[in-house]
Amino acid sequence: MVEIRLTNTRTRKKEAFTPIDPRNVRLYLCGPTVYDRAHLGNARPVLVFDVLVRLLRHVYGADHVTYVRNFTDVDDKINARAAATGRTIREITEETVAWYHADMDALGAARPDHEPRATEYIVQMIAMIETLIANGNAYEVEGHVLFDVRSFPEYGRLSGRSVDDMIAGARVEVAPFKRDPMDFVLWKPSEADQPGWDSPWGRGRPGWHIECSAMSAALLGPSFDIHGGGIDLQFPHHENEVAQSCCAHPQADFAHVWLHNEMLQVEGKKMSKSLGNFFTVRDLLDRRIAGEVIRYVLLSTHYRKPMDWTQGKADEARDILWQWRLLSKNVEPAEAPHPELVEAIANDLNTPGAIAVLHRLKDDPPLLLSSARFIGLLQVGDDEWMRADFDALDSQVALGDFDQVLTRLQDRLAQIRADAMTSKDFSRLDRLKSALIDAGLEVRMSKAGIELVVSPTTVQKNVARIAEDLET
RNA sequence: GGCGGGUUGGCGGAGAGGUUACGCAGCGGAUUGCAAAUCCGUGAAGACCGGUUCGAUUCCGGUACCCGCCUCCA
């Protein structure tokens, strides 16, 4: 069996992965707060986990993995969006969930087994908060319930901070009713115009952190295998989850392995609205950058390193995928991926190493195909982006399939070339050739004949025009 | 101030204490009416300063610079 090694934030080491129960390997990934389109950085942990889940299913069996990713659908940002647009919270969250699904689908990320919504687990959250109060880890004050960080000696261990350090560096205004400045909210009161649920502490809504603790416990149990997210969630979100879950389930030990991906940058800078380099996955798709291309770029840097999104990388990825697509056209995939590729992924999800393996498989298209698919590339149906549409074409001639246009062109060119070879006058042929190259076509002439190959830059419309002119 | 990530050849980007990463670009050759594609070959690296070692880009310490978290942004 393939040995999987993962870097565990909890221990700061790369460790051999041993599931609690090999018949049911359980993972949890913090999902989005649904108030707007997912930006490119949101896609990174999703793809990291997508690759991880593919590996785990390969090793432990497709039916022996449970992958949970939540939707946070109660949050003050959502409330603000509703107030600003005059729409209902429900409309906004439903719409955003649908967007999220569409965008992540486009990146080839398989849907998790469960996608719980926070609002469906309020009962479990209230129960967990009651337990925390009963255990002496939380207290109610002025309609709020707060977690008492001093009651959990391990607090700060995941993120490598001590409570005292955090207080020293804190720049937060501390609510006067907190026992300790680092205490965080489990439950807070809602105004009449805010979403709220009845609870032992009055009508209110949950704090952010308790959601993930309650949903992971409900769907995966108090102890499970892998928990992940962006490194920015390590503190406070994940630290607080650990505190809540471990105190509510003292006999359990919550997530065994913590995986954190480093952040994404754009052209060397942090992606932010103020820098004007902020964009969503949908923005890229709308610019006709294929989901598969985005996936390739994100997987071409190891998940624990900061990664830079650049247009140059997107272009290179497009060209490589195009080449692989041509190579594996009409090819049946081999039965299994290349062992070295699986080994690379098993070694702390070394996706750049896996891509290097793919490059070496150019001579074996079936194996290239099965191996690429192991990391979600060259999937059936993801090659839509290779077909330019004819919508804008206002040709007089009915064109039919573009392949037929190319075949006709090839034949005409071959004829013209044969004539040129005898007359030694290549001027017309050269003019045609450069016109076709300008239109983005590859023109391959050999003794065997002429082959026209579409490239990522082919403007089919222009090629069709040339073909048309040649006919008349 | 505290915690963490990064710094590899022109660009992107890995593994490994000693033997080719890989890709893109470049260069040389084969091939071609000319090209393209393809094939063959090839140069090019490890921020800086110390230490450990027979040997370090890889381990340890320090310096510099970049980035992030500590503020419910993955």
Image (cartoon, grey):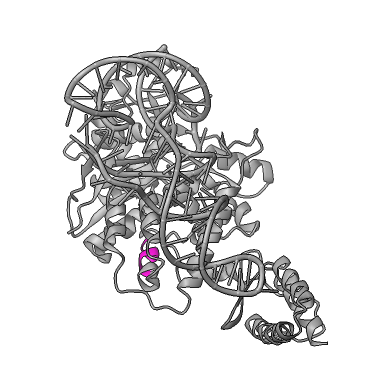
Give, as a single range, the part of the protein colored magenta: A370-376
User: In x, y percent, where is residue A174?
Assistant: 46, 17
Q: Residue at x 27, y 55 (%)?
A: A343
Quadrant including the C terminus of chain A: bottom right
Residue A37 shown left or right of residue A331 in the figure: right
Residue A212 drawn in magenta:
no
Residue A375 drawn in magenta:
yes
A78 vs A378: above or below: above
Q: Residue at x 30, y 30 (%)?
A: A158
The prevailing secondary structure element of the residues shown in magenta is helix
User: In x, y percent, where is residue A31?
Assistant: 44, 47
A56 or A167: nearer the eye? A56
User: In x, y percent, where is residue B14?
Assistant: 35, 44
Q: Residue at x 30, y 74 (%)?
A: A335
Residue A364 shown left or right of residue A264 in the figure: left
A95 vs A62: above or below: above
A195 vs A172: above or below: below
Which quadrant of the view contains residue A131?
top left
A316 or A179: nearer the eye? A316
Figure disc tally: 0
Would you say residue A339 is visible in this rendering?
A: yes
